[in-house]
Amino acid sequence: MALAASIESSGKVVIRRVGLMLSGDIDQPILDADTVVVEDGLIRAVGAEKDCDTAGAHRVIDCRGTAIAPGLIDSHTHPVFGDWTPRQSQLGWIDACMHGGVTTMISAGEVHLPGRPKDILGVKALAITAQRAFDGMRAAGVGGGVKVLAGAPVVEKGMVEQDFAEMASAGVRLLGEIGLGSVKAGNEAAVMVAWARKHGIQSTIHTGGPSIPGSGLIDEHVVLEADADVIGHVNGGHTSLSYRSVCMLCERSTRALEIVHNGNERIAILTARHAVELKCPHRVILGTDAPAGSGVQPLGILRLIALIASMAEIPAEIVFGFATGNTARMRSLSQGLIEVGRPADLVFLDKAQHSAGRDLLNSVQLGDIPGVGMVMIDGIVRCQRSRNTPPASEVPIIIEGSTLRG
């Protein structure tokens, strides 16, 4: 079964009668198109159906006027191994999040592993093992086929540049949250961030009060001195810095501003507004910071989109871009945008049944979570009507082995 899943290919898929196409690009959030053609997992055409080569499709998806968007990217997760989290003793949490439209998760450290090693050799071994294990899990289709980018070591005192070079050569591309280990001073962190960057490893720093035993306060001065690539949970995980401190990070740094579900909601709203006022909305990315003490939130990214759109009064189509194209660019990912050549990771959406909104975007602007009608990863349908969202007003239908007529 695992072998069959690992070599599964989408073939040619035609997605037609799209009522609203969200690009993921906040500079052009809505595309004037009603058709997407996918071949072997990649987007090959986007446009009007009459202008696309739709012949010979292995599968046709009739959207019936519903919306599609790039699959949502959760920029801040804490996986451990498989589709299980020891923090909440919960099985199937990754698959559950896929039913919430999430197709990619990025690890901020496998910190909840019982007995997590903190010696340097153990830190490196865990990172390499997690990176290998989650890549293999995805190839086997476990966890709904979600792309879990894992293997994010929490840096410890005593690490040297060679350690980063070794991890990079083994395939490690992320650092876990700086501040969750023994490295907490800005000057120490800055050295390791520079080593990581030199070897192609992206860094994230914890922001705010402590979240787990061994972590501590990381204030705005430490964040600015460390200069990590991503200012992790800028609205706190859970306890936020003051709004004045967060404004300083918005104004004095050029790095990604990561807003999370499991943080201070007031600061989340104010941060999003401030980024728009500063004309740097491209820096805003979204995550859940789950699993955590707050639990697992399968709809966490959708809830965060609805919160920011409704309370920060930012157009919903822009906020969808925070969770897709912005994250793709800040994280150097190929997925996250509906463009030719990108992976066909897509979520099919409509307003929830009986929402007061007149359509999908208006319903989200009013604070409602949309209904997910289908999720696709690499052109392969991973679920149809979501078991976790409110039911969508309309859902797409699949027509197998169809040739389009009329």
Image (cartoon, rainbow, N blue to C red):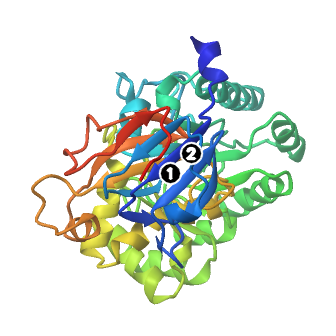
Identify the amino acid type marked 2.
Ile
Q: Residues within 10 Å of mark 1 (few under 14, many from 20)?
A: many
Q: Which residue is mark 1?
A: 73
Q: In which quadrant will I find the N terminus?
A: top right
Which mark is nearer the camera, 2 or 1?
Answer: 1
Q: Position of residue 307 (x, y in %)?
A: 28, 65
Q: At x 47% / y 73%, what residue is drawn?
A: 32
Q: Is residue 262 above or below residue 315?
A: above
Identify the amino acid type marked 1.
Ile
Q: Earlier in the sequence, mark 2 or mark 1?
A: 1
Image quadrant assignment for residue 243 = bottom left
Q: At x 38% / y 80%, what residue is drawn?
A: 273
Q: Is residue 194 visible?
A: yes
Q: Which of 160/96 is in front? A: 96
Q: Which residue is mark 2?
A: 106
Q: At x 52% / y 87%, what residue is drawn?
A: 279
Label 2–label 1 contact, CB within 8 A: yes
Q: Is residue 109 above or below residue 143?
A: below
Which secondary structure lies at badge 1?
strand
Q: Position of residue 356 (x, y in %)?
A: 10, 65
